[in-house]
Amino acid sequence: MATDNLSKIKLLLSLEDKNQDDLLNLLLEDDEARLLSYINQDGGNVNTFPSELAWLLREITVRRFNRIGDEGKKSSSESDVSATWSEDDVQDFAVYIDRYRHKTGNRGIARFI
C-alpha cells in the first residue's frame, strides 16, 4: 500500500522525479502512525492501516508536504497569495476516522468507580 500511496501523492503534487521520495515516505510513515494512534486511542488493536482510509492518509501527507518551511505558523502570505493551516490535521478528519472507529468497535472505555 505504501508504494501505491507514494505514487498517488506524487501525482497529486505533480512530482515526476524521485528527489522527494524519502521525504514523502517519512511523512507517510509518520502520518500513518498518528492516524493509527487516533484510531486506537480507546484501547483498540488495529495494527495495520485500513485501506479504506488511505485517501485520508494521502490528504494529510499532502497537507504536511505543502506546509514544509512554514511549520509552526497558522498562516503565511506572499504577494497576493496567502495560506492558512489547521493546527491539527487529524482533527480536521475526525468525523471520518470516528465513523471507522465505531464501525470496528472502538467506541471507548467505560470505567465504573
Image: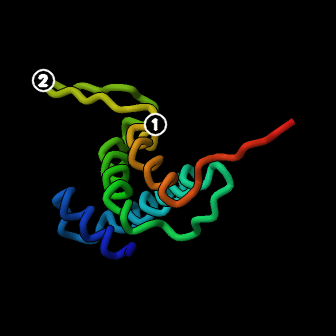
State which mark lies toward you, 2 or 1.
1
Callout 2, which amino acid? Asp
Left or right, residue 83 beside residue 57: left
Q: CA distance from mark 2 to mark 1?
A: 26 Å
Task: Specify the label residue 88 is tagged with.
Answer: 1
Return the residue at label 2. Answer: 80
Number of disc labels: 2
Whole-percent x, y for residue 49 in the image: 48, 66
Q: Is 50 drawn above or below residue 98 in the view shown?
A: below
Mark 2 surroundings within 10 Å by alpha-carbon count, few (fewer than 14), some (14 through 19), many (20 or more) = few
Q: Secondary structure at mark 1?
A: loop
Q: Secondary structure at mark 2?
A: loop
* Quarter in which the N terminus is drawn: bottom left
Whole-percent x, y for residue 14 in the image: 16, 59
The one of 98 and 25 positioned closer to us in this rendering: 98
Of all residues, the one furthest to the left in this rendering is: 80
Q: Earlier in the sequence, mark 2 or mark 1?
A: 2
Residue found at x 34% / y 32%: 85
Residue found at x 87% / y 36%: 113
Whole-percent x, y for residue 64 in the image: 37, 47
Left or right, residue 83 beside residue 93: left
Callout 1, which amino acid? Asp
Whole-percent x, y for residue 86 in the image: 38, 32
The one of 23 and 34 positioned closer to us in this rendering: 34
